[in-house]
Amino acid sequence: MDSLPALTWMSVESNPVAFIQDIIEIAKFYTDRILKEFSQKEDALHVQFVEQWLKTLESLKAFVQKYYANGFTWKKVLPGLSNCDTTDFEVFDIPLPPPPPPPVQSACHQSVKRLKKVTPDMQVHKNPSLRTATPVCKPAVAAKPAHLTKNLPSAKKDTTKPPVLTCDDKKWLIENHVDNKDIKIEITDMKQVMYIYRCENCVIVVKGKLNSIALDSCKKTSLLFDNIVSSLEIINCQKMQIQTMGTMPTLVLQKTDGCMVYLSKEALNCEVITSKTSEINLLIPTEDGEFEERCVPEQFKTVWSGTALKTTPSEIA
């Protein structure tokens, strides 16, 4: 790019040859680096381009030195056509273009002037007799043919799926239950897992010890279980109630709004992990058999300690 100004040698008033030579010297500062970097590589495209470009600049320098050593001169033409040499150009007999059409605005003004003026006897609010005139009836719209309206699908399809309650090997599936208050599961193997999906306004009781439970996209559902070996996950749920009668090492809540978790004395060391949640309350058992409600923080404060970020619950949370 630094050598492209050599093509503007015609703008130099005197000694354009020296101007081109200076540009060549500047260009060699970069071309030498390219030749050194790509000379040992198999792809010689860069080297060939640089060599051809330098030859082009040298040819331009030789051309200017031969024909325009003292600078490029323009032919002087005196003002006025009488002093011009008519052999230097040709005169073409070209007809003039047609005039442009009239402006649109003027046409609009002409149409407005031709509008008929509305007199007081034509105005409804000044002439009560016009109010009793027979209104203009709208034309009747023809009904659509029967073959176009027959057996058309409804605009809103019923997306309700049948409820599912099965155990596939070691995985329990509880799906699409609505207003079912009597779902009871007996666990026979502690390696079994349970997946509860899209249940609404249900009560689920799990007897026995199992590996893990996951609730996904449930609403207003209560879950009561004995023991969990691994974790309980609650994802994308609303207004849930959870109670453990035994152990629960880990509780994970993601994208959940409203959840009350009743802990047992065996589950007081439970690790609670939350992400994008709100209105999460833990109910801690007391010595008198009651529960003390504690809110999980929703707002946090993060500061830079000089070596790392430190996050603590906000005081207003």
Image (cartoon, rainbow, N blue to C red):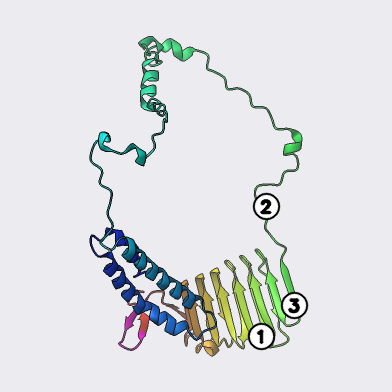
Residue 157's disc is: 2
In what element is the residue under mark 3? strand
Magenta stretch: helix, strand or loop mostly:
strand
In the image, residue 178 lies at what x, y percent?
66, 63
In the image, residue 308 lies at what x, y percent?
35, 87
In the image, residue 52 lies at what x, y percent?
45, 72
Give residue 298's quadrant in the image: bottom left
> From this viewpoint, is residue 245 visible?
no
Name the one closer to the observer, 53 or 70: 70
Q: Which residue is mark 3?
A: 167
Residue 73's disc is: none
Circles 2 and 1: CB distance less than 8 Å?
no
For the point 65% across and 86% down, which residue is it?
211
Instruction: Tell me the kind of residue under disc 3.
Output: Cys
For the point 53% across and 87% down, which residue is it?
267
For the point 55% across and 71% down, which residue is it?
240
| Left or right: 291, with 16 as reference point | right
Work out how far the residue at label 1 is from the one at label 3, CA to CA, in angstroms.
13 Å
Residue 210's disc is: 1
Instruction: Tell me the kind of residue under disc 2.
Output: Lys
| Left or right: 287, with 1 as reference point | right
Q: Which residues are magenta?
A: 300-309
